[in-house]
Image (tube, rainbow, N blue to C red):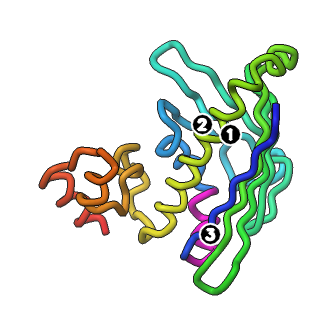
Amino acid sequence: MGAFEISRVVPVPAERVWQVVTDWQGYARWLPLTTVRQDDGAERAGWAFAGLTGVGPVRFSDSMLLTDWDPPRSFRVRKTGRLLDGWAEVSVTPLTETTARLDWRESITPRPVATGRVLAPLLDPLNRRLFVSVIEAMAREACLPPDPSPHRTPREARFAGRTPAKRASRGVRSWGARGVRALRERG
């Protein structure tokens, strides 16, 4: 039930960071086993989206409502689903013309709240760890040229910008010639 905050300095203009963190479909690339559904039309206070996480028929919906929308600086969402309660505040601050800071604050509580209180000591560190990896993936993606194809697979997005040597140093197998060739063609 504790809120956590994660900040990253990203070596790209703030507009590019904003573009990535508000790519709602991108959350499917950064969160495992997740797809995203969203309202039609432009984002505004009252606009909604949901992350559907799970496998096959075993899924849960993390539905959210935009409560504040101040592009390209910040947004705030409130979790409105049956399973999760909480909120998230995201802001992008230009530090220089080519550097921005991404600040992410979030509070996630399982419903019912009494259950959430009992599970908090276990879930809070896991949530923070998950979102550290999500925000690092967002920062990596922001450093890449904008992708003309928004249908990148989660694996491609996760390893975007890493050379085979960097992947190997993290214990990740290389994609092989075909995967590397596909990445070169994109960027």
Mark 3 neighbour class, 10 Å CA radius: few under 14, some 14 to 19, many 20 or more:
some
Mark 2 to mark 3 CA distance (whole Å): 29 Å
Tell me if 15 is positioned left or right of 133 in this view: right
| Residue 18 included in the magenta stretch of the image | yes
Residue at 17% x, 60% y: name it.
Answer: 181
The stretch of residues the image draws in magenta is: 12-21
Mark 2 vs 1: CB contact within 8 A: yes
Residue at 56% x, 47% y: name it.
Answer: 134
Residue 21 position (above or below residue 15): above
Return the mark for residue 5.
none
Return the mark for residue 37.
2
Q: Main secondary structure of the magenta part?
A: helix
Mark 1 neighbour class, 10 Å CA radius: few under 14, some 14 to 19, many 20 or more:
many
| Residue 177 included in the magenta stretch of the image | no
Mark 1: which amino acid? Phe
Mark 2: which amino acid? Arg
Return the mark for residue 49.
1
